[in-house]
Amino acid sequence: MAAEPYPRNLDFSTNYNFRDVGGYAGLGGRTVRWRRLFRADSLHRIGDADAAAFTALGVRTVIDLRRPFEVARHGRVPHSDGLDYRNVVLEHVDWEQVAYPEGTVHERWLADRYLNFTEDGQKALAESLRILADPEAAPVVVHCMAGKDRTGTVCALALALLGVSDADIAADYALTEPAMASLTAHLLRTNPEVVQGNEHMFDSPAAAMLLFLADLRERHGSVEQYARDIGITDSDITSLRGHLLEN
């Protein structure tokens, strides 16, 4: 992993999991560019206190992976001139309806949820990757509610296509773990029923991401082949690598 010329974690007063995914070693020894791709928890919480810092990032595109009822209930990133907001809905099985019996291997349960994203959410994953492949869309922020699962899957696929190792992808995913402590504390104050009884949904062990990536390759041969299977073209992949990797 390269040295970090920028802070990876961005400190916002009401966002808890906003960070840059630059700096990782990719194809041919090239490095993922900083300040081009960010991942975050829901941006509806950005208010006046953080507006200037958010604007300073120069974000052009926000990919909001949440479902319509989530956007309606919580709101969206504030409107601003030059910001392209895309509500790219990632369809998936409701996690509350998925059993979590005693003795469940937690990492396996999470990896299976991410595999479900790659099945039911193919349209949104393809659209998200095409947006990320467009240099005119960058800098881009990808987010869902917590910035952990749907966001983590999109970022994992993008980083894998950039040639980032599974170990680094899993380590980036696991960086959400400390952020979840602050986010769950906020939710327990403001919306406790979201957390209580669902504690198994709020962590991000690296092993879950490693399992997911291994299973995706077992099913499709490679992450690149999965991307092609859902409609990503060679031109898209070339463009993604062309502007998200340092020359």
Image: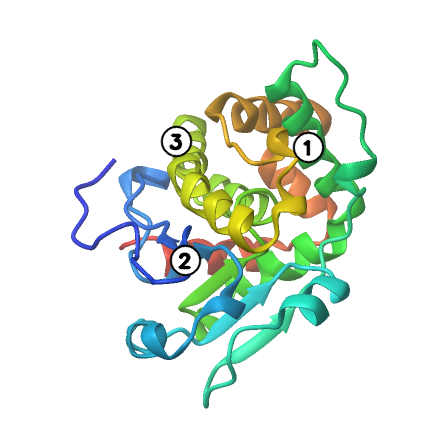
Q: Position of residue 108 (x, y in %)?
A: 65, 19
Distance CA(mark 3)–CA(mark 1): 27 Å
Q: Earlier along the polypeptide chain: callout 2 or callout 1?
A: 2
The quarter of the displayed image where residue 123 is located: bottom right
Which residue is identified by label 1?
A: 197
Percent from the top left, x then y, of residue 185? Answer: 46, 44
> Mark 3 or mark 1, which has the lower sequence index?
3
Against 179, is 200 above or below? above
**Crowdedness near tag 3: few (<14), some (14–19) or many (≥20) residues, C-alpha within 10 Å:** some
| Amino acid bearing label 2 | Phe
Where residue 201 sits: x, y (%)?
A: 62, 34
- The residue that appears at 48% across and 51% down in the rendered structure is 186
Determine whether, in the image, residue 71 is placed left or right of residue 138.
right
Q: In the rendered view, would you say 1 is above or below 206? A: below
Q: Residues within 10 Å of mark 1 (few under 14, many from 20)?
A: few
User: Of residues 76 and 216, which is closer to you in this image?
Assistant: 76
Q: Quadrant of residue 244?
A: bottom left
Considering the image in quadrants, where does the C terminus appear?
bottom left
Type of residue at label 1? Gly
Residue 89 locus on image (x, y percent):
72, 61
Q: Residue 59 or 55: which is nearer the viewer?
A: 55
Task: Residue under label 2, please give it.
Answer: 38
